[in-house]
Image (tube, rainbow, N blue to C red):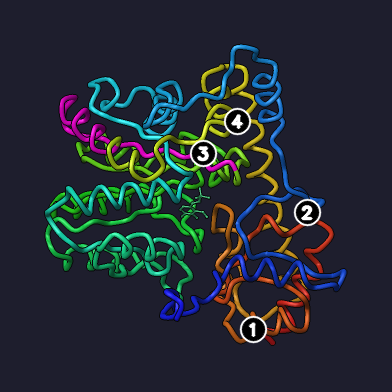
Amino acid sequence: VSVFQQVPLAPPDAIFNLTNQFKADTDPKKINIGVGAFRTDELKPYVLPVVKKAKAILFDDETLDHEYQPIAGQKSYTNAAVKLILGQDSPAIKENRYAGVQTISGTGANHTGALFLSLFYNKSKKCYISNPTWANHRNIFSLVGFEVEDYAYWNPETRGLDYEGLLKSMRDAPEGSIYVLHACAHNPTGVDPTREQWKGIAKVMREKNLFPFFDCAYQGFASGDLDNDAWAVRYFVEQGFELFVCQSFAKNFGLYGERAGNLTIVTKSTEEAQRVLSQFEKLQRSEISNPPAFGSRIVDIVLNDAALYKEWTENLKYMSSRIMEMRKALYENLIQLGTPGTWNHITDQIGMFSFTGLKASQVKVLKEKYHIYMTENGRVSMAGVSTTNVDYLAKAIDDVVR
Ligand code: PLP
C-alpha cells in the first residue's frame, strides 16, 4: 500500500487553471482578462526598459559572484524597499525603528509576516481579511493557524466601499485582532478608501488596538505615483502604529517570475526592531535559508540610482496610463452600445482590476460563447484589454447583460 494513499486530490488553482484553459483555446478572438499581469497594447508581456538597463549592468559586473545572499537580504535592497514604502522622511526611518526582510515576492512577505505573528503575536488569534480579497490571503493566514474572518468591504449596490460596514466590523472584532489592509489598488475591487476614510479607519483601529497588516502589491500602479500610493501606510506610521507592510516588485517592476519582495516592519524602538529582525532571520533560515539574488539585484540597482529611479517612474506612468486609457475605452464602448446598467465604476476604480459586477452565469457565457476568460467574481484584469480587443469585449459584455 502506498504511503500516499490517503492524499486527496486538491482542486487546481482557479487563476492558473483559467490561464491554462485560455492557452488551450484556439479561437483567434480569445481574450485573457484573468491573471493580473501587465500586457502591452499588443498584449505582449512587458519588460520594463529600466529593467533591461539594470540587467545589462548586472551582466557587465565582473565583480559579481554567485555566493549566498544574507539571510534577510542585502541591506542596500531592504533599506531601499523600506524607504520606497515609508518615504525617506518617515519618522520610523529617522528614529531607526524599522526592519526589512527580503521575501519571496509579495506572497512570501504575507506568509513570513503571518508566520511571525502566529508565533509571537499573542493579542488575538483572529485575522480579518476584506470581503472580497486576493484569494491567497485566506490560504496564507489559515495555513499558519489564524482564525480567518471577513470584514465588510464591497457594497454591490453602490459598487463602492462599504465604509460603515468596515468600521462596524472593526468595532465588533476582538481587541488586538489583525487586519489585512490593501495599501492601494485593492484586489479585486479597484476601490480604495479615501484619505478621510483612512483616517477614520486608523481611529477605530487605534481604539480597538487592531494590528495593521498592510499588503502593498501595486505601489505606483494605482495612481501612477509612488508616494501617492503609499499615503495610507505613511499615515499609519505618522499616527504611531506598529505595523507590517508586504511589498511585491512583481507588478511595478514587471518582475513576476523573479520573486523579489520585502516585508517592512515598523516597531516602537531600535532595540525592538533588532529583536524582531533576529527572529525573522531565524524563521527565514528554516524556510528558504537565503533569498534569491537576481530580481532583488535589479530592484536594488534601480532604487539606488537617481537616474534609473526616475526612468522607472516613467515606465510606471506608461503602465498605469495604458490601464487608465483602457478603462476609458471600455466605458465609452459600453455607453455607446447603450448597455443596460451603470458603468462609471469602470473608470472610477483604480489599479489593475475592474470589478464589473458581472455574475458568475454571465462570466460563463463570456467564456463559452466569446472565448473571454475572467475570474468567476466578475473581475477584469484591465491589462488584458487593448485597443484591438476592447470593441469585441464591450459587445460581448453588452450581449450577456441584456
Ligand atoms: N497581494 C495582493 C493583493 C496581490 O494581488 C498579489 C498578486 O496578485 C500579491 C499580494 C502577491 O503577488 P506576488 O507574490 O506575485 O508578489
Task: Point out the tag, 1 or 3, that comes first from the N-terminus.
Answer: 3
User: Dot 4 corresponds to which residue?
Assistant: 313
Helix, strand or loop status at disc 1: helix
Q: Is residue 240 left or right of residue 64?
A: left
Report the amino acid beneath label 1. Answer: Gln
Task: Point out the tag, 1 or 2, that comes first from the N-terminus.
Answer: 2
In the rendered image, the quadrant that contains the N terminus is bottom left
Task: Point out the tag, 2 or 4, that comes first from the N-terminus.
Answer: 2
Which portion, as a residue range, is magenta?
Answer: 258-280
User: Dot 1 corresponds to which residue?
Assistant: 362
User: Dot 2 corresponds to which residue?
Assistant: 43
Helix, strand or loop status at disc 3: strand
Task: Point out the tag, 4 or 3, that comes first from the N-terminus.
Answer: 3
114 vs 376, nearest the viewer = 114
Image coordinates for residue 295, horizontal then vertical, percent: 57, 34
Q: Which image quarter: residue 32?
A: bottom right
**Rendered residue at 25%/47% (across/down):** 116
User: Dot 3 corresponds to which residue?
Assistant: 260
| Cα–Cα gap, marks 1 and 4 | 38 Å
Query: Within the magenta stretch, is there residue 22?
Result: no
Nearer to us: label 4 or label 3: 3
